[in-house]
Amino acid sequence: MPSPPEIRNTGGSLTWADRFDHIAARWGYRRMHHRVEPGLYRLGSPSPDSPVFASANYTLSFDALRSSLAGTDCFILVLDTKGINVWCAAGKGTFGTDELVFRIAVTRLSDVVRHRTIIVPQLGAPGIAAHEVLRRSGFCVQYGPVRASDLPEYLATGTATPEMRRVRFPFRDRIVLIPVELVQALPLTLIAAVLLGAFIDMGAALRVIAAVGAGTVLFPALLPVLPTKDFTTKGLFLGVLAMLPFAALDLSAPAAGTLAYLQAAAGLLLFPAITAYLALNFTGCTPYTSRSGVRREIFRYTKPLAGMALGGIALAAILGIVMVVNG
């Protein structure tokens, strides 16, 4: 006689340990360790007719789902997305058709529930081909709302309104991305600032700090008001704005001449390229862009940004040589 399918228990209430885990994840601490075990979970006291929801094995995704469903008797099927959230995992293919079909089979979901429906978050749709899931597993995929907080209303009405389908990227969602981006960029930024301050001047050190700050802090905060469509050109615009005060300071010196123009030009080439590159990184972690959009930006702008950076470095090298020659 076969053993019953393994089903883990979970709850709808978040503990202090859960909230600490979320803070650590937001700050990039042990980035790949915020996971739950893939498999089938029981929330409340579900029956064979209770709904089944799919989620990623990233704690923030899983916790957002289970806390939104507090008081609902249901099952949660957790896919192995390698600790990546639903949106990003759908883009990478780990929240995908193959993994969903595999997880349905390995958890023996068809022995647990009488119906053949599984509710997938809308942001996971890029990775899930519903017709393939139906053909290979017999389960029908329903795409739920964008936000887990809308699930109770979705369950009550059986439909997702246009408002629930609308993908937003509000200020609160953008600024929570700042800490992890800042932490990742901080070590190299500090090293560069110290080297530039020691071997060139404090102005160069402040420029690199301003360029990275613009790309990691100001860019997500100001995203909707920055002109142009592409993230890279938005970042380039912001990077130039951040460097203009330094250039104005160079050119306003009483003895400003050719060297001042060289210094200003080097700064306006090199540091906005850094800001634009950091802005380009955001294409992969926001719901603004599609997979094809991310690739398009990378192929279109990587070489021009590298050219700008090399041009700035070349001008800075010429400036250094001229200063040495002139004593």
Image (cartoon, rainbow, N blue to C red):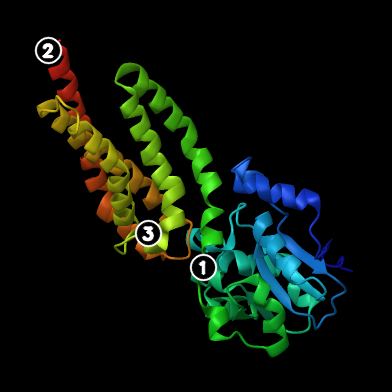
Q: Position of residue 240 (x, y in %)?
A: 27, 46
Residue occupying image coordinates x 66% and y 65%: 55
Q: Is residue 196 above or below residue 130?
A: above
In this view, the residue farthest toward the front is 254
In the visual, does 72 lie left or right of 184?
A: right
Quarter of image, res 190? top left
Locate the C terminus by quadrant. top left
| 97 vs 235: above or below | below
Q: Which mark is residue 127?
A: 1
| Residue 209 at x, y percent in the picture | 40, 35
Numbered disc 1: secondary structure: helix
Q: Nearer the viewer, residue 268 or 98?
A: 268
Q: Which residue is mark 2?
A: 325
Q: CA distance from mark 2 to mark 1?
A: 59 Å
- Locate residue 34, reporting x and y percent: 67, 48
**Residue type marked 2:** Val
Can residue 202 be seen in the rendering of this structure? yes
Q: Quadrant of residue 140?
A: bottom right
Of badges 2 and 1, the one in the foreground is 2
Q: Amino acid at mark 3?
A: Val
Looking at the image, which residue is at 37% across and 59% down? 294
Relative to the observer, which residue lies in front, 119 or 107? 119
Within-10-Å neighbours for mark 2: few <14, some 14–19, many 20+:
few
